[in-house]
Image (cartoon, grey):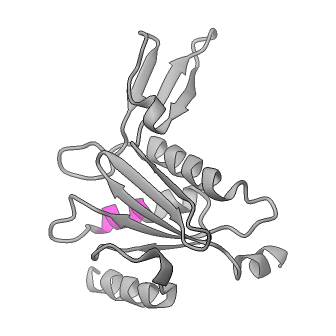
Amino acid sequence: MLRKILNKFSPIIYVQIWENRIRVVDTKTGKEFDEKPYLLTRENSKGVKVIAAIGNNAEHAISSNEESINPFSHPRFLLNNFFVAEKILQHAIYTLIGKFSLRPAPTIVIHPMEKIEGGLSQIEDRAFRELALGAGAYDVVVYTGSPLCIKSIDIENLKKLDDTVSAASI
């Protein structure tokens, strides 16, 4: 019950995704995470892969036990590695608004910025929704129009547009 009340005051997070960039903005505070979408893994002494870095610092692997992954790099689709993309988005949101223990979970507007010719398939749409939910979203809108002005995002109108687009693709 308390969670439902808190979520009425949830922040709106605007996420723009390109193959080589992810921009995440808290629309209420204007705080921004704008980096390259890389995750660097490293094998620890037990041979288990652990996250070593995220963002610009993770672009290049330095040693043989490291791997740099861009989850948005694929010839046909924007989303290539769901698990890594989710970790990067979680990190970006945590950087902007902190953990959600007593804070309301955010409403997230996911905006793929490229590789959307002809619109998103149902699979791509669902993958982006699941990505945002896995990153901690309370509510998700997938948007494919021109870039939004962060100061004037009208979430209710975007939801109506999103519902219309989703219904048209069924």
> Image quadrant of residue 144?
bottom left
**Relative depth, front residue between 116 and 56:** 56
Residue 69 in the image: above or below residue 86: above
**Relative depth, front residue between 81 and 149:** 149
The residue at 34%/89% (across/down) is 164
Please provide percent x and percent y for residue 56: 44, 36
Q: How many marks?
A: 0
The residue at 27%/86% (across/down) is 168
> In the picture provided, is 15 more to the left or to the right than 50?
left
The secondary structure making up most of the magenta span is helix
Q: Is residue 117 magenta?
A: no
> In the picture provided, is 78 more to the left or to the right than 161?
left
The residue at 51%/63% (across/down) is 25
Position of the N terminus by quadrant: bottom right
> In the picture provided, is 75 more to the left or to the right than 107?
left
**Relative depth, front residue between 96 and 103:** 96
Residue 59 in the image: above or below residue 94: above
Residue 75 in the image: above or below residue 39: below
Position of the C terminus by quadrant: bottom left
Q: Is residue 39 visible?
A: no
The residue at 62%/56% (across/down) is 96
Q: Is residue 155 visible?
A: yes
Please provide percent x and percent y for residue 74: 24, 43
Please provide percent x and percent y for residue 37: 40, 43
Magenta-tinted stretch: 122-128
Residue 63 in the image: above or below residue 97: above
Please provide percent x and percent y for residue 41: 50, 25
